[in-house]
Amino acid sequence: MRHWIKTVAIAAALILIPASFLAAQDEEAKAAAIYEKAKKLVYEKQWEQAVKAYKDLLGAYGNKTTDEAHYWLAYSLYKVSQNQSKVNDQVRVMQDAVSQVNALLKGYPSSSWVDDAEALRIDIAEELVKSGLPEFKKYIRESAGDEQEDVDPEMEMKLVALNAMLNMDSEKAFPTLEKVVREGKSPKLREQALFVLSQQSSEKATALLADIAAKDPESHVREQAIFWLGQRRDAASFEALLKLYDTVNDPDLREKLIFAFSQSPSPKAADKLFEIAKNGKDPNAQEKAVFWLGQKNDPRALDALIEIYDKTSDKEIRDKLIFALSQQKGARARQKLIAIARDGSDADSQSKAIFWLGQMKDAGTIDLLVELYQKTENIEAKKNVIFSLSQLNSGKTVLKMIELARAEKNIELKKQFIFWLGQSKSEEAIRFLQEIIEK
C-alpha cells in the first residue's frame, strides 16, 4: 500500500497536473489536432475534405473553436459549390456557407475576421441572387450601409426591368445601362446595371466598367465594377485593372484588384503580383500579394517569395512568406523552410517554419524534426517540434519522442512530451509513462 501511495505521489509531483486539468487538456488537444488537420486541407485546396474536418470540429468541439474555423468552413463550402455540376446543389452549398458566415458574425462581432467574412458573404450573395434567390440581396445592401432601407416598389420594378435586359440585344440595351450606371441615384440600381453590363462582351462595355470602377462615388459600386472586370479575362479588361491599381489608394479597392490579378491567367498579372509583393510601401497590399503568390504553381512565384524573404526583416511579412512557402510544391520551397528552421537568429520565424515543415509529412520529416529539436535552443520551436512529431502518428515517431523525452532536462518540455505521448495510445508510450510513474 505504501508503495502504491509513493508511486502516485511521485507521478503527481512529476507531472504537476490535476486530473480535471488533464481531461480539459485532452479535449483541447483533440480539438487542436482536428483544427490543424482542417487548416492543412484548406492550404492543400482539398475543399470537400476541409469541409468535413471543420464540420467535425464544430460538431464535437464547438465551444473550443474560434471565429477562424467558421470563416474557413464558409470559404471551403464556397469553393465546393463552384465544383457542383447541378445548380440546386451549388445553391444549397452556398446557402450553407452563408450560414457559417452568419455564425461567425453573430458569435464573434469584434473578430479580426469580420471584414473578410462580410466580403466573402457579399461574393456568395451575388452568386445566389444571380441563381434566382433575391432574398440574399439584403447582404449586398448591408455592405453599402442601407440595410434598414425600405423596399421601394418603384425601385423594385426598375431592378426587375434591368434583369430583363439580360435577354435583350446588347446594342439596344447598352444606352439604357450606360445612363443608369452614370446617372442613377441609387447605388443598388447602378450595381444591378453593372451586373447586366458585365454580361456584354463589347469593348465599350469594358470601357464603361473601367470608367465606373475609377469614378463612381460609392466605393462598393467601384468594387463591383472591379470584380466584373476581373471576370472578363480579356486583354482590355486586364489593362484597365492595371491602370486602376496605379491610380487608387483605397485599401479595399486595392485588395479587390489584387484578387483579380491572382485569378487572371495573364503573365502580366503574375508580374503585377511580383511587383506588389516586392514593394513594402503598402504593407497590407504586400501581404495580400504574398498570399496569392503562395497559391500559384509557378517557379517565378517561388523565386519571388525567396527573394522577398531574404530582403525583409518585417515580422508580419515574414510570417506571410513562410506560410506562402509552405503552399509551394517541390524541393526548393521545402529547402528554404529547412534553412529558416535551422537559422536560430529569428526565433519566431524559426518556430513558424518548423510548424509548417511538420505539416508537410514528407519522407525524412521525422529525422529532420529530431535534428531541429536537438540543435535549437528556442523553446517555442522545440514545442512546435513536439507537437509536429505527435501528429505524424507512427511507431518510429513515438520511439523518437521517448528518446528525446528521456534526454530532456527542461521540465516544461518533458511535460509536453508526456502529454502528447499519452495521446498516442502506443504500447511503447504506455510503458514509458509507467516507467515514469514507477521510478
Image (tube, rainbow, N blue to C red):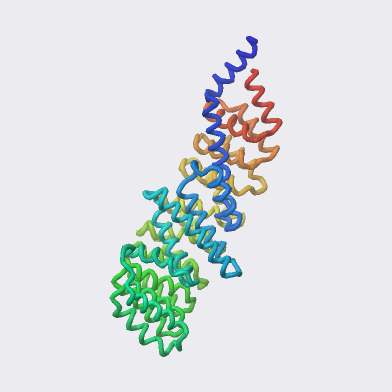
Q: Residue furthest top?
A: 2
Among the 4 quarters of the image, the one containing residue 212: bottom left
Above or below: residue 437 compared with residue 287: above
Among the 4 quarters of the image, the one containing residue 278: bottom left
Among the 4 quarters of the image, the one containing residue 222: bottom left
* Residue positioned 54% across, 58% down in the render: 76
Q: Out of 40 and 293, give the one closest to the viewer.
A: 40
Residue 72 in view of the camera: yes
**Percent x, y of residue 389:** 61, 39
Above or below: residue 296 compared with residue 316: below
**Percent x, y of residue 338:** 56, 47
Q: Quadrant of the C terminus?
A: top right
Q: Out of 253 and 372, give the one closest to the viewer.
A: 253
**Percent x, y of residue 5:** 61, 13
* Residue positioned 45% across, 49% down in the render: 67
Q: How many marks?
A: 0
Q: Quadrant of the N terminus?
A: top right
**Percent x, y of residue 235:** 47, 79
Residue 338 in view of the camera: no
